[in-house]
């Protein structure tokens, strides 16, 4: 606006990652002689921009995949910066070394950035306070920041951040700043709505699929119809007869059809005549499952933990429980089918689209196309779900290759079927659990698992609470790509372990909640070997959820409860599933969940994540599986790849957080692993039948 | 290729396309109304839900040639200022996670309230058949009840 002062000078913060995920802060000055810099923006670091007209923009450094970090990360900055949340703008940062590790995965965005982002905000605030003190000619100690202004209480004078921006920009960056006492938090720990809520409810372009650029073509790609097959030849005569077709290109093992609209490109792709030939084994699920059972009957070569002597405790003189659980392959099926925009021309690449790993996308594109990384820009839209699928950057790499070959900007759109057939799946697994008992006590616990691709073990509870405990795991080699799916490993391990624990309680005739508490007490008083969890934190959630759900009290007729608890991503969860039998059929009526995840940043977002993970976990336990038939996926779309609909979801999911001032731990994933067991245990309570094979709906 | 004249969000629009082109892609690629989403293309997920003469339909299997003089309303046209009671309730309850399914959900909920201003949980179960992969169902249900309380059909 008209009040912009004439001196022009900008500061840039140099940020580089240091061990432990912190930031190193340093400045380089661009002198006022630079004619390109006309406004006196205050950009104390890469995350904050304050213009003289008072516009405050905060950057969200990690990809937003529906886990809420476009809201929660800027909340952390805003807290220490002391600004009014209603008056700030938020942008998702493009890929840039300034922002450190820009990954969405491992429930790590808030965990890793909590302290560093607080410092980012506090540094800028301190500089603004100094600028105000100098302007007013008073000691800085007499000034404080509040709602985007600095106030000098004694004189009642108040200067807005905007009016201080150009002065603050000339100040040195303090190396040591004071952080707020958490007791004084005004934003962190409150309920804040998703930053994009207005855009979402009005259908504004937000997602990768909404990208539209001058001269852009739409591409749909024919990829191999089965794992183990490769392209032999193709004929595009019929395709070229259709309207809107611009180019047909072979890219490695695929054929891309470029057209003036998505529909034209899809019709063109479907009209291709393609010949595929065998290039490897054509694997089927039935073969995997048979191999699993064979492997489980033998001792696994890899033992991750072996306390006491399990075999001695499993001899004929003891009562032994020996059961097997199985979980299928599943697909990520994030709601927004994969897509990516790429414009690769003249040795430069501009990429924009959904990915959880922009950094590795850039290095792969650099390698494939021999373009210097600094000539590759990657922008990030809001993303229609992730669940781990986009930890693989194949969609972005493919788009870059197609644009480079086509020499024009391209939006590559995957159909749902393409997405289902070309995934990095959650591996299927089978688990054998054994326990032995003596005089009403649990004597030994043995868990053995086999997974597609590679073994996966967990050292968590009940290890540490039992004299005799052994865990072992092995992998079955496959040519079908396996990857990371929400709470990798834990997602099915939690089901098997906590279902078995319920069976153990049943054998012992002990209350499932009381018995877990007993185990925690043992792990605390006389731990066996190393323990990887905090028994007190476990107890905090177990006791809380028991109270929330009226556990152990008389339930209304036709109401049945199931309990489960799990620890992952440093977060403790306990859940109770409440079933009602309605006209002879069980319906999940309510779920109660207690969470100990340290400090909660955004109560609304956190609760939404927990509720979502629980519904996700119930749906995948009940309905969902991928079957391979000679390398081809059988469940190619939502007709037979099933998700919960409203009529199958709980009427309420009640979430409570254990109050904590500890640094935040994981949130997007940990509520999923326990829920399938809580459901199976509730179904047992209701029906007397054990559900040991997912999806339960087929049992 | 044929030129189709369409009434979308109370405006006359036209698109030149093959007759079999689903309305979804006409909206997204020809008319640049990208709020309506693609999720499955087989009428299973409801991400593509729009209103035709006030009724919710899945536009991914609805050929443009079938539209005729019927009036189409998309998420962009549900209200002028984004303040349809369903939109307001969706904001109030902070329903969205990734947000991708939500324009379809909002259109489905708005159509439900139009024909049933005070739906019970059972009515909601029956009418809300769209997929939400993120699992926002609990909040959607609460938002629908809240919108109904405020007269969810008003415009
Ligand atoms: S895209 Fe139309 S129902 Fe899924
Ligand atoms: S909010 Fe992500 S699919 Fe519904």
Image: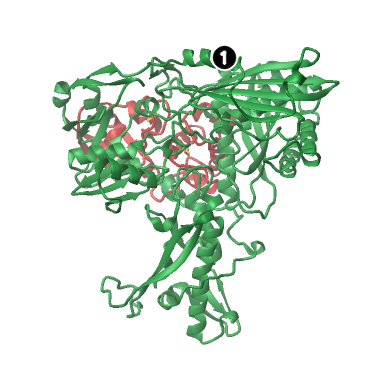
The chain containing the residue under callout 1 comes to: A
Above or below: residue A103 compared with residue A74: above
Task: In the displayed orientation, state which residue is furthest to the right.
Answer: A439
Mark 1 vs ligand 2: CB under 8 Å? no
List x then y, in percent, for residue A655.
65, 41
Task: In the displayed orientation, state which residue is furthest to the bottom.
Answer: A137
Which residue is more in the foreground, B63 or B111?
A: B63
Q: Colour of chain B?
A: red
Above or below: residue A103 compared with residue A325: below
Q: Colour of chain A?
A: green
Above or below: residue B56 compared with residue A208: above
Q: Quadrant of residue A549?
A: top right
Look at mark 1 in the image and give the residue it sits on. A293
Name the element at disc 1: helix
Instruction: Characterize the local packing of mark 1: few (<14), some (14-19) or many (20 or more) Cα atoms within 10 angstroms.
Output: some
Residue at the spot x=26%, y=74% of the render? Answer: A35
Residue at the spot x=75%, y=41% of the render? Answer: A539
């Amino acid at each position: 606006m008209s009040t912009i002062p004439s001196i022009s000078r900008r500061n840039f913060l140099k940020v580089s990652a240091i061990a432990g995920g912190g930031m190193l802060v340093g400045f380089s000055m661009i002198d006022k002689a630079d004619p390109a810099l006309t406004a006196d923006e205050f950009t104390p670091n890469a995350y904050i921009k304050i213009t003289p007209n008072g516009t405050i923009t905060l950057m969200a450094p990690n990809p937003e995949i529906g886990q809420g970090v476009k809201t929660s990360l800027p909340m952390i900055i805003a807290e220490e910066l002391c600004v009014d949340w209603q008056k700030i703008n938020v942008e998702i940062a493009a890929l840039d070394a300034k922002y450190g590790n820009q990954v969405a995965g491992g429930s790590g965005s808030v965990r890793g950035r909590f302290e560093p982002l607080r410092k980012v905000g506090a540094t800028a605030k301190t500089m603004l306070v100094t600028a105000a003190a100098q302007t007013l000619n008073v000691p800085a100690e007499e000034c404080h920041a509040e709602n985007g202004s600095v106030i000098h209480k004694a004189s009642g004078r108040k200067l807005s951040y905007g009016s201080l921006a150009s002065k603050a920009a000339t100040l040195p960056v303090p190396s040591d700043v004071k952080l707020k006492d958490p007791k004084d938090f005004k934003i962190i720990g409150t309920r804040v709505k998703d930053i994009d809520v207005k855009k979402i409810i009005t259908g504004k372009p937000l997602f990768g699929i909404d990208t539209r650029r001058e001269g852009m073509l739409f591409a749909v790609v024919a990829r191999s119809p089965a794992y183990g097959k490769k392209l032999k030849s193709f004929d595009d005569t019929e395709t070229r007869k259709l309207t809107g077709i611009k180019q047909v290109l072979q890219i490695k093992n695929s054929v891309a059809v470029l057209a003036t609209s998505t529909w034209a490109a899809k019709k063109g792709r479907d009209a291709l005549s393609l010949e595929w030939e065998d290039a490897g084994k054509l694997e089927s699920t039935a073969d995997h499952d048979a191999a699993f059972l064979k492997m489980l009957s033998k001792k696994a070569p890899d033992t991750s933990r072996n306390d006491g002597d399990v075999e001695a405790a499993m001899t004929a003189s003891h009562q032994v429980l020996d059961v097997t659980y199985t979980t299928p392959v599943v697909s990520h099926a994030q709601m927004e089918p994969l897509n990516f925009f790429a414009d690769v021309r003249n040795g430069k690449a501009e990429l924009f689209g959904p990915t959880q790993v922009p950094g590795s996308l850039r290095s792969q594109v650099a390698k494939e196309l021999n373009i210097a990384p600094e000539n590759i820009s990657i922008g990030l839209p809001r993303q229609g779900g992730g669940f781990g699928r986009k930890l693989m950057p194949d969609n972005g790499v493919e788009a870059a290759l197609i644009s480079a070959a086509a020499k024009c900007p391209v939006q590559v759109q995957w159909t749902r079927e393409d997405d289902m057939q070309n995934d990095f799946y959650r591996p299927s697994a089978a688990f054998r659990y054994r326990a032995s008992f003596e005089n009403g006590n649990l004597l030994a616990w043995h868990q053995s698992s086999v997974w597609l691709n590679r073994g996966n073990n967990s050292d968590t509870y009940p290890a540490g609470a039992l004299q005799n405990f052994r865990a072992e795991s092995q992998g079955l080699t496959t040519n079908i790509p396996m990857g990371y799916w929400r709470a990798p490993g834990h997602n099915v391990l939690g089901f098997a372990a906590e279902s078995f624990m319920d069976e153990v309680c049943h054998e012992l005739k002990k209350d499932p909640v009381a018995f877990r508490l007993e185990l925690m007490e043992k792990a605390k008083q006389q731990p066996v070997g190393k323990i990887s969890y905090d028994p007190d934190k476990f107890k905090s959630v177990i006791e809380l959820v028991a109270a929330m759900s009226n556990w152990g009290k008389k339930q209304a007729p036709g109401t049945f409860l199931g309990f489960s608890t799990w620890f992952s991503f440093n977060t403790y969860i306990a859940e109770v599933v409440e079933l009602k039998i309605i006209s002879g059929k069980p319906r999940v009526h309510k779920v109660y969940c207690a969470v100990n995840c340290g400090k909660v940043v955004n109560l609304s977002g956190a609760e939404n994540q927990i509720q979502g993970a629980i519904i996700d976990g119930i749906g995948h336990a009940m309905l969902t599986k991928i079957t391979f038939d000679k390398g081809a996926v059988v469940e190619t779309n939502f007709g037979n790849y099933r998700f919960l609909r409203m009529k199958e979801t709980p009427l309420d999911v009640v979430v409570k957080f254990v109050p904590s001032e500890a640094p935040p731990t994981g949130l997007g994933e940990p509520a999923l692993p326990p829920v399938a067991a809580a459901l199976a245990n509730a179904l047992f309570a209701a029906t007397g039948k054990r559900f040991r094979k997912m999806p339960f709906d087929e049992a | 290729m044929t030129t189709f004249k369409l009434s979308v969000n109370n405006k006359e629009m036209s698109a030149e396309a093959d007759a079999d082109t689903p309305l979804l892609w006409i909206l997204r690629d020809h008319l640049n109304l990208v709020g309506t989403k693609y999720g499955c293309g087989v009428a299973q997920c409801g991400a593509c839900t729009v209103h035709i003469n006030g009724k919710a339909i899945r536009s991914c299997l609805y050929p443009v040639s079938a539209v005729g003089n019927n009036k189409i309303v998309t998420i962009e046209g549900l209200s002028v200022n984004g303040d349809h009671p369903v939109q307001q309730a969706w904001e109030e309850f902070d329903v969205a996670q990734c947000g991708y399914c939500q324009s379809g959900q909002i259109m489905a909920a708005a159509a439900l309230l139009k024909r049933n201003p005070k739906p019970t949980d059972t009515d909601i179960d029956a009418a809300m058949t769209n997929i939400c992969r993120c699992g926002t169902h609990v909040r959607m249900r609460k938002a629908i009840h809240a919108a109904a309380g405020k007269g969810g059909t008003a415009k």
